[in-house]
Image (cartoon, rainbow, N blue to C red):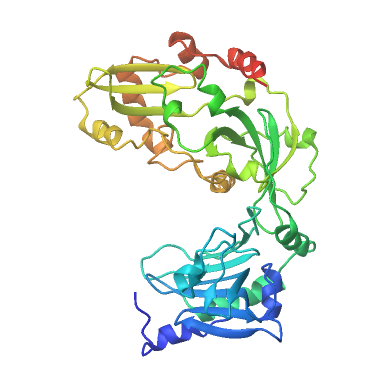
Amino acid sequence: MKINLADVKQLEYLSFRLTNEQRQYFGLDGIEDDWDEVEIKTGTIVFYQGDVIRKVIHFDLFRTFTYKEYDTELFTNSRQFILPKSSKGKEKKMTPSNILSFMPTGCTFYVSLTSNGGNKSMVRAYNIRNNIELPIDNDENLNHVSELESWIHDYMNTCPNGYFDKVNKMRETPHRTIKYSTGDVFRFEIDREHYGFGLIIGEVKKLRERAPKNHPWKFLMTVPILIRIFEIKTKDKDLSFKDLFSHRLLRADIMSDAELIWGTHEIIGNKKLAEDDIDFTLHLECISDDNHRLVYRFAWGYGIKEIDHRSDDSELMEKVHEQLYSNSGVALSLPKYQLTNVLNNQPQFTESVDLLHPYNSSLFKKVFEWFGFSLDMDMDQFNRENNGLTREQYLSFSASYK
């Protein structure tokens, strides 16, 4: 959307700036006295120190107000062209798109306000170079710049002791690649004061070695891992394993390993897995087989069963065709909201993705009827009957690939 300078609301948005004091709380450098502020184009501002761009501010008013500020180091040719990062590159014109195409060298502060009927608002502070982000909370219902300014004021006044340790960690931690393995326990930040813990129970790339060729695991994107989250929210970041393991685990889910390999969530130890630790997601989908026939596929762990296409329940057919219970996706980041749901006495997963959701009890019974399963069948029984692995067998298998 083209920025309209005659629009009073847009002008008010464009006048928003963080103060240097506020920048400290979000990991940003302050603006120095010898920096020059230059507007490249309405909505894109840079700060020069000599001929070097040290900071960029960019507004986007396409759907709602967004403000992005980040620290950088872009060398220029007399402020007319951006110099290449390597000897093989070419100078680029000083345009917003060219400026924004370079990765920040420092931290980024990003705000997106809500619009009528739009998504929730969001405030983020992160360092793209080490994948560390501040655990910002209570930022979902900001509709106007004045509300954002009040929120920032309250945020600064309610920061707990040790908050700037998190800021400095985000600012100073170098890029790193972390190795992980099955059984690793990791810690994550829920908000500025509270921590949660998770457990890796499988690396899908290794699970695929034993899985049938048509198993849903074969088609998952990214580098997925099977994880479970402990049902606990605590201020004690150094909670003993004895206390931690006394809390039950939520049901399993699949997420990308990105936040673990880049160190977003810290691995704090390893647990020797027991049968009670093992859980697998359910997969239900309608697919076309090698003979181009429509079949229903049910997978639970390594076990898998297929039956011919059915036409005796149009409601369930439609839902399965829409892949509502397929679990075919991978969470790109740790699904912390699932822990929040459970702690608030809500189902872990939403109705549309979880066949075991309380609202889906009749559909669950219908699926089990279709496949000829008994309603009291557990995961081990399903795997014994469908060429899979029981929990005990899975533990032996997972131990072999460590």
Rendered view: 116 above or below 245: below
Q: Position of residue 14 (x, y in %)?
A: 48, 83
Q: Position of residue 132 (x, y in %)?
A: 65, 54
Q: From where the camera sits, is residue 85 visible? A: yes
Taking depth in this image into account, of 44 and 148 the one nearest to the observer is: 44
Q: From where the camera sits, is residue 141 visible? A: no
Image side of residue 350 versus residue 391, left or right: left
Quadrant hosting residue 115 = bottom left
Quadrant hosting residue 150 = bottom right
Taking depth in this image into account, of 78 and 336 the one nearest to the observer is: 78
Q: Residue at x 71, y 82 (%)?
A: 32
Taking depth in this image into account, of 78 and 335 the one nearest to the observer is: 78
Q: Residue at x 42, y 22 (%)?
A: 215
Quadrant where the N terminus sits is bottom left
Q: Residue at x 66, y 68 (%)?
A: 26
Quadrant where the C terminus sits is top right
Quadrant hosting residue 82 = bottom right
